[in-house]
Image (spheres, rainbow, N blue to C red):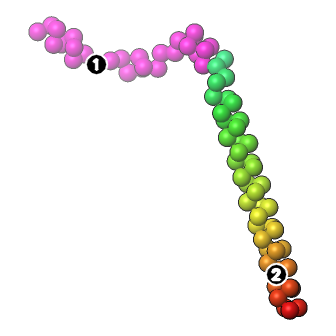
Amino acid sequence: MNAMREAARPVAPLQFLWIDAARTKRFVLDEQGVTAIEYGLIAALIAVTIIVAVALVGTDLNAVFNTISSEL
């Protein structure tokens, strides 16, 4: 009967928040994901630049074609 009571005993409410100093230090010093994030930011910046350039060139190109078609 005692075994059932011990198995059903609830976990302390804040026990899962226990922070280990060594684990925290490893997490802070780990730089593996940093490179992937930097590459992602660079790719996003390049994509935004391409979108803006295409949008600007597209309107200018449309004006050029309209001018050519009106002169024909």
Q: Which residue is mark 2?
A: 65
The furthest residue to the right: 71
Q: Residue 33 occupies which quadrant of the picture? A: top right
Mark 2 residue crowding within 10 angstroms, few (<14) / some (14–19) / many (20+): few
Question: Viewer-proximal residue, 9 or 67?
Answer: 67
Would you say residue 69 sits in the magenta stretch?
Answer: no
Q: Which structural element holds mark 1?
A: loop
Q: Residue at x 70, y 37 (%)?
A: 39
Part of the protein shown in magenta: 1-28
Residue occupying the point 77% across, 55% down: 49
Side of 52 relative to 18 (left or right): right
Identified at 57% across, 10% down, the residue is 21
Q: Position of residue 9 (x, y in %)?
A: 25, 16
How many numbered marks are there?
2
Mark sitting earlier along the chain (2/1): 1
Amino acid found under the numbered disc labelled 2: Phe
Label 1 Cα neighbours within 10 Å, binned few <14 / some 14-19 / many ≥20: few
43 left or right, relative to 4: right
Please, what is the three-letter code of the amino acid marked with disc 1? Pro
**Residue, disc 1:** 10
Between residue 27 and residue 40, name the one nearer to us. 40
